[in-house]
């Protein structure tokens, strides 16, 4: 399974971030071809030592890295990627990796 993890920094306006995320961005992301699941953190993001510097964590799962890359390269994937600038005013770090269960 391949994953894309988005670590969103605190936005300038948390309410506007939440409205755009749920009303626009998640519906766009759900249209990405090959997407198997979409998860978003709820409540504060924490580390074992205490609060993390992130406002929200998003995780997109695909069957393979090929599917992830094809999905992101599709018009739907490009639209979702372009939309990030519309609400992630604090910036975002995106990680992509293959995963396996043990």
Image (cartoon, rainbow, N blue to C red):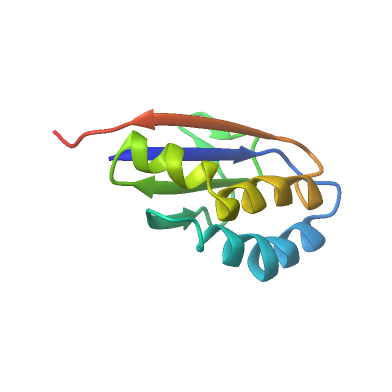
Image position, residue 36 (x, y; %): 35, 56
Q: Specify whether 6 is left or right of 1.
A: right
Residue 44 vertical position relative to residue 52 in the rendered view, above or below: below
Q: Where, quadrant-wise, is the C terminus in this rendering?
A: top left
Which residue does the image show at 74% across and 63% down from the upper left? 20
Q: In front here: 68 or 88? A: 68
* Residue positioned most to the bottom: 23
Q: Where, quadrant-wise, is the N terminus in this rendering?
A: top left
Residue 37 vertical position relative to residue 78 in the rendered view, above or below: below
**For the image shown, how many numbered marks are present on the structure?**
0
Which residue does the image show at 28% across and 33% down from the upper left? 99
* Residue positioned most to the left: 102
Which residue does the image show at 74% across and 42% down from the upper left? 10
Image position, residue 12 (x, y; %): 86, 47
Image position, residue 9 (x, y; %): 70, 38
* Residue positioned most to the right: 12
Q: Quadrant of residue 28?
A: bottom right
Q: In front here: 76 or 7? A: 76
Image position, residue 72 (x, y; %): 52, 43
Q: Specify whether 101 is left or right of 63.
A: left
């Amino acid at each position: 399974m391949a994953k894309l993890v988005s670590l969103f920094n605190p936005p300038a306006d948390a309410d506007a971030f939440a409205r755009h995320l749920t009303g626009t961005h998640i519906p766009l992301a759900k249209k990405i071809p090959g997407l198997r699941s979409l998860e978003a953190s709820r409540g504060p993001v924490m580390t074992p030592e205490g609060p993390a510097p992130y406002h929200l964590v998003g995780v997109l799962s695909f069957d393979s890295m090929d599917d992830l890359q094809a999905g992101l390269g599709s018009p739907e994937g490009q639209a979702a990627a372009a939309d990030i600038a519309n609400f992630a005013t604090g910036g975002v770090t995106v990680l992509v990796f293959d995963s396996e269960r043990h």
